[in-house]
Each structure stands twice: as structure tokens, then as C-alpha cells.
Amino acid sequence: MLLKDKVAVITGAAGINGLGFATARLMASHGAKVVLLDLAQAEPEAAASRLGDEHLGMAVDVTDKASCDAAILAARERFGRIDILVNNAGITQPARTVDITGSDYDRILDVSLRGTLYMSQAVIPTMKAQKSGSIICISSVSAQRGGGILGGPHYSAAKAGVLGLARAMARELGPDGIRVNSVTPGLIGTDIIKGKLTEEKKSEIAETIPLARLGRAEDIGGACIFLASDLSLYCTGITLDVNGGMLIH
Ligand code: NAD
């Protein structure tokens, strides 16, 4: 039980095949009370009830500051504290540089980057008052290697922005007892890649990965447990690669 009595908020957590839900399930199994946030159409209340009555699901749009603030207020009213935030909500789009429109740019950057800022802003006052907290930002190998396999350059830029934001927050918030770290997943088999890669293509990619497979959602959940728990008390501003060796640098 690495997270006994901790309260964890996870964005983009309702998709049962997604990284957010896998992280929520793993955190719940380690004793955390979990607040699952997602867009209304993703039905976050239903996702929370899969984990049990002690968890909470709420509709939130992370690109909307008032929506983020309202969710954190409700989470505080229910649980009294917030120990962990996982900034996981993100969307992708394959596109070439010259084809990216202004609205594509806004959409992709807003969810990953603005969303990470707004949700972090929403929890920081509570964590400061507690003098402790762990914020985990889900970036991507795409930020590090200049494109993953599916996302366009605007996705790489959004996820690289997340790394910069996380590092700067880590420096600023360390003295308040708040740790901020990033996870850079490689290619993980979730709905984000569903229908976009044939089984043949996935096997081809797996052959190029030292650990010889695509990632599983639980692989990211495990990294988040480490960063959320006291096992990583002296880690802040780090980037934890969870990519099977796809990028070693
Ligand atoms: P996913 O599509 O299953 O999950 C993303 C979730 O974010 C969805 O539940 C979606 O409803 C939610 N979301 C979208 N816009 C939102 C908004 N405005 N407000 C709140 N929630 C919103 O995909 P996933 O693979 O589980 O991705 C999770 C995170 O991991 C994303 O940030 C993604 O970019 C990142 N990532 C994924 C991979 C991969 O290979 N799967 C690799 C690197 C990084």
C-alpha cells in the first residue's frame, strides 16, 4: 500500500483502455482515493463507480479554467485534501507541418499544455497549504525524439512544452514541498492509437524496441505510482522514460 489515505486527481481518466484509468485503478489498489476527471461524454462518473463508492468521477474540460477550479473545489469538499495530480488528458493528430491550421494548433496545445497549467494552478494552493504534493505530467517520447509515430509536430511541441512547464514548476514549488515530475511514454496500446496502426505495423515497431513489445497502460501506471509515492521523495523535475528502450539517451 504505497498510497494509503492519499487523494489523487487524474485527468483524462475515464477511458477504460487509457493510461489515466489504468493509473487510477493502480492507485486505488495502493489505497488512494481517486478523483477521475474527464469530458462529460467520456462518462467519468461511470468510470469512478467501476473502482468503488469511495472514488469520485466528475466532468471537466481541462482547457476551461473555471471547470478545473470547480472540480478541485468539489474534490476538496469531498476528501479534504489533494496529494497527487496526474496531468494525463491529451489528444493527438497526425499532420505535416505545413498542413497544421491555427485551430489544429490550438486544440492540440490547449488540452496537453494549457490543461496542465490550469489543473496545476487549481491544486497548488491546496498543496502549498499542506506543504506537500506530487504533480505528475504525462508528456511523450514524441517530445524527445521529434515526433513519435502518430502525432504531428504540434503534438511534439505540446508535449515538449509540458516538459518545460513541469521543470519550471518543480523549481518554483520545491520549497513548498511540492514535487513536479514528468513521464514520457513510448508507444502504448490505448484508444489513442486504435484503428491507426495495423497489427503488422505494430509488430514491425515492436521489433525495433529493445523490450520487443508495445507498452501497456499499466506500465505508465507503475511509473506514476513511483512518482506519487514516498519512494520518490527526493525526485523533482525529472523525466521518467517509459518506452521499452525505444529512445535511450
Ligand atoms: P486516451 O485517448 O485513451 O485518453 C485521453 C483522455 O483524455 C480521454 O479519456 C479523453 O476523453 C480525455 N480528454 C481529451 N480532451 C480532454 C479535455 N479537454 N478535458 C478533459 N479530458 C480530456 O489516450 P491515452 O493513450 O490514454 O493518453 C493519455 C495521455 O498519454 C495523453 O496525454 C497522451 O498524449 C499521452 N501519451 C500516450 C501515448 C500512447 O502511445 N498511448 C504515448 C505518449 C503519450
Image: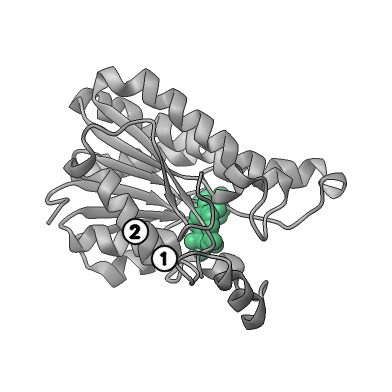
Answer with the quarter of the image where residue 114 lies: top right
Badge 2: residue crowd in 10 Å (few <14, some 14–19, many ≥20): many
Answer with the quarter of the image where residue 69 lies: top left
Residue sticking out furthest to the bottom: 199
Which disc is residue 240 wearing?
none
Label 2, secondary structure: give it: helix
Label 1, secondary structure: give it: helix
Which disc is residue 217 wearing?
1
| Residue nearest the viewer, comparing 110 with 248 | 248
* Residue 39 seen in this snapshot: no
Residue drawn at x 78%, y 54% is 95
Residue drawn at x 18%, y 39% is 80
For the N terminus, give its image quadrant.
Answer: bottom left
Q: Position of residue 86 (x, y in %)?
A: 38, 46
Residue hosting label 2:
221
Q: Position of residue 113 (x, y in %)?
A: 56, 38
| Residue nearest the viewer, comparing 246 with 51 | 246
